[in-house]
Amino acid sequence: ARVLITGENGTGKELVAKWLHEKSNRCGAPFVEVNCAAIPSELIESELFGHVKGAFTDAHTDHIGKFEQADGGTLFLDEVGNLPYEIQQMLLRVIQERKYRPVGAKEDRNCNVRIVAATNEDLVKAVLEKRFRQDLLYRLQDFTITLPPLRNCQEDIMPLAEFFREQSNKTLDKAVKGFDSSAKKALQLHPWSGNVRELKQKIQTAVLLC
């Protein structure tokens, strides 16, 4: 099944995607990640589907796209809500027909990938605002996993803090032993707008300064 992972930035959507891949029967094949928000709109088609030599001015050689790189495995589309509308149509065709065509190619190629997508956006709202295709949303969310913000998971804060303390000790060659009561209280009261990513950074900085 295709899986849509939703949640705020820093909640661990990529980790969940990798875990899904590692526990699936595709675990021996590639896990390929695409940050849809980081690729310029004019390059996203070539990045996803590849291109052939001579397809455009700077296409001096063939380029293998992410779909081909992920063949047999999992393609993780991070920040999928940022895909341009015309690319959404192409993605929908790939899902429906299991075929795609590299830029400049004359023939389609078969597609054998599992798509896992993630977003911090409200895609239902994006559909209403005509920024995201409703039919694509239905195709992407065979199953939806929503990751809660860290501020709603108080019981996770200290176990994560201890994990990052130990990790930072190894990385920074330190020997910080734990947290005093005031530090624990501060960690519990902090709103963590950056979620687990922010917590990791704060703990690493604290270990560095000790």
Image (cartoon, rainbow, N blue to C red):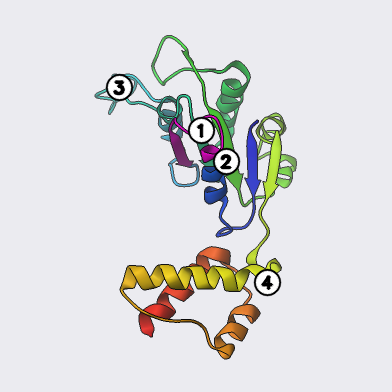
Q: Which of marks 1 and 3 is nearer the N terminus?
A: 3
Q: Position of residue 96 (x, y in %)?
A: 63, 19
83 over 65 or under it: above or below:
below
Nearest the viewer among 47 and 10 is 10
Question: Please, what secondary structure does the residue beneath circle 1 have?
Answer: strand
Q: How crowded is mark 1: few (under 14 residues within 10 Å), some or many (20 or more)?
A: many
Residue furthest to the left: 60
Q: Name the residue under label 1.
A: 74
The quadrant of the rendering that contains the C terminus is bottom left
Between discs 2 and 3, the one toward the N terminus: 2
Direction from residue 100 to residue 142 in the image, left or right: right
Q: Could you tell me the amino acid type at mark 1?
A: Thr
Which numbered disc flags the more N-terminal residue, 2 or 4?
Answer: 2
- Per the model, the C-alpha gap separating discs 4 and 3 is 50 Å
Magenta extent: 20-34
Q: What element carries label 4?
A: helix
Could you say which disc has been placed on residue 62 in the image?
3
Q: Is residue 27 magenta?
A: yes
Q: In whole angstroms, how far apart are the C-alphas of marks 1 and 3?
A: 22 Å
Q: Are marks 4 and 1 in contact (CB under 8 Å)?
A: no
Q: Is the residue marked by circle 4 packed among few (<14), some (14-19), or many (20+) residues within 10 Å?
A: few
Using the image, tell me which numbered label, if any, was put on residue 20.
2
- Helix, strand or loop at label 2? It is helix
What is the x, y in percent for residue 93? Answer: 59, 21
Q: Mark 4 points at which residue?
A: 154
Mark 4 or mark 3, earlier in chain = 3
Q: Residues within 10 Å of mark 2 (few under 14, many from 20)?
A: some
Q: Residue at x 51, y 39 (%)?
A: 22
